[in-house]
Amino acid sequence: MNLKKAVLLSVLSLFLVTSLEAQKKKPEPLKVEPPFWWADMPVQELQLMIHSEEIGHWRASIDEPGITLVKQLSGDSPNYLFVYLDISPDVEAGTITITLKNGKKTQTLNYELKQRTTDKARNLGFSSSDVIYLLMPDRFANGNPDNDTIEGMLEPANRADNSGRHGGDLKGVKDNLGYIKELGMTAVWLTPVFENDQTPEYKAYHGYAATDMYKIDRRFGSNQEFVDFVQACHDKNMKVIMDMIHNHIGDQHWWMKDLPFKDWVHDQSVYGNTTFRGTVASDPYAAQYDLDKLQKGWFVNEMPDLNQHNEQLADYLIQNTLWWIQYSGVDGIRMDTYVYPYADYMARWAKETLEAYPDFNIVGESWVETVTHESYWQEDRDGENDGYNSHLPSVTDFQIHFAMRDGFNSDFGWETGIMKLYFALSQDRLYADPMKNVIFMDNHDLNRFYSTLGENLDHFKMAYAFLLTTRGIPQVYYGTELGFKQGTQGGDGDKRADMPGGWEGDARSVFTRSGRTAQENEIFDYVAKITNWRQGSPAIHKGKLMHFIPTDNVYVYFRYTDNDRVMVVMNMNDSEVTISRDKHIQMLRGYSKAVNVVTDEAMNIAGDFKVPGKTTSVFELRVR
């Protein structure tokens, strides 16, 4: 054999071996989202986002009774294929087979449709009958120290860092549900528990920089642990509100290494970062430049801004919402940065979510400056405003927060002091239903309210009584029941202290009476007394509100139904004052007795009566 033939045979042999190896090579594994679905869902359309190397060159087909392939399309990246299915309500649970072909190459995707849970004790919604307890899992309690730092995840736990990850988790919260129940809370709102696998420099313990929207962060627990947590809350007759974010993701999200479409996120080099001016979204005179900065600018450099006008992304986000509702059984959603995304998308999201789960409820974070701007984002009444209907039942009522912050920190005057509370409430006609507003003294983004009031315990108690008796759905930030103070190290960590006793080795535990200071027990007892009382008050849950213009630093209002009546007297003066029966006879007629819900003391109100200074007195009225 001559040299030329030998070389030719060698090349041919290598080609044959390579071809055989190529034929043996398995296709890249398929990442499919959602990872599974259910039969007989309240929506028939299912979008499958399939991610794998060059999968965009493949095409899907399906031959299953009751299932139709509606459309399919590739992304700008060749590594994505979007497959839309229509699933008839009569399709039974089981595994469906989707065939994927690329020329002569074929692979099979076996996709599970689970049996849908239709238990009536889940997806219950929340209302003015509830009191919501807001907590940050990372800062509440560390039930499983083994998951504090996980190999392969970017940020380890470091409790010494005020702004770092501290190791709190779902098990820690679950272990202390009895404490939350004892306070009288009826719903638990967790800041986001999605995977936030961000760099240690960013510090994503708060959960608002998702890197995978179908996974619970493993440092909080597993997906199944979240399901178990929701069930544990339901077993204690407490609801669960899940925090979601559709405005942005974390810059370490797996999408960012391979965007499905070029316009999946907004271009930061064009729009920069947001101005945080939420009023722009409802401003009839807003310049396009300002709208673009709000809606397309990134929240911070580590949070790419999502483009919900990309149809596939919008479908993905809505479907992700429905998946979590069905999978976990949560009762409501708090949507972060509600006014930042495109308003038409947010309206579509709210509408489709509530059509699928009519008993559900949603509150949108609408951090804006005035009642007018706030009310714009609640579902419209009779086509008001500019024709825009958000379909959003509830908003975060920052106006009540502002009124409490300023009202309890200034002397009484026509536009100051407790007049701030009166003026805020007197504009309620602008809301479709102010009873659905979520009201609060503070939250994880605001300074601790006790410190905001200069650590004035009397004012703090008065403010809490107002929060629990005015209209709306009260939200209480963890630690409020103990008089948590604002930290002094700087940064958001100052607002988000650990609960003492939530970690092994803590010097004391505030989860026990013996572990609390005398003042902490005083505040705890006051909060628990009035919050537990509220659970059984129809007048507070669904009653109307009537208030009298504050006079001489005294504010009187009533909550009432046909059969129940509550009188609230806020006396900001240092000394006791006399309350005129004649002035308030419209509400007092027919009632001669009152019981103080905090002290349980009965009082004769057949004539004028006295109330103590620096106190918000809450009375249940009695005929005799």
Image (tube, rainbow, N blue to C red):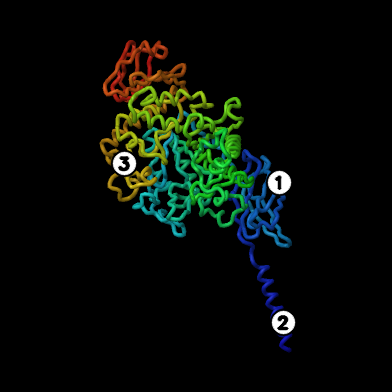
Circle 1 residues within 10 Å: few <14, some 14–19, many ≥20: few
Q: Position of residue 227 (x, y in %)?
A: 49, 44
Looking at the rendered image, the quarter that the N terminus falls into is bottom right
Mark number for residue 546? Answer: none
Identify the image quadrant of residue 485: top left
Residue hosting label 3: 510
> What amino acid does circle 1 point to?
Val
Above-or-below relation of 602 to 3 = above
> What amino acid does circle 3 point to?
Val
Q: Position of residue 410 (x, y in %)?
A: 34, 29
Circle 3 residues within 10 Å: few <14, some 14–19, many ≥20: some
Identify which residue, 283 or 325, lies in the foreground: 283
> What amino acid does circle 2 point to?
Leu
Residue hosting label 2: 9
Q: Which numbered disc flags the more N-terminal residue, 2 or 1?
A: 2
Is residue 212 in sight in this rendering? yes
Q: How many marks on residues? A: 3
Q: Position of residue 582 (x, y in %)?
A: 37, 10
Residue hosting label 1: 70
Gap in angstroms between the C-alphas marked 3 and 2: 81 Å
The answer to the question of whether label 1 and label 3 lie on touching residues, with beta carbons closer than 8 A, is no
Q: Which numbered disc flags the more N-terminal residue, 3 or 2?
A: 2
The structure residue drawn at horizontal position 29% and vertical position 18%, both measured from the top left corner, is 577
Which structural element holds mark 2?
helix
Q: Which numbered disc flags the more N-terminal residue, 1 or 3?
A: 1
Which structural element holds mark 3?
loop
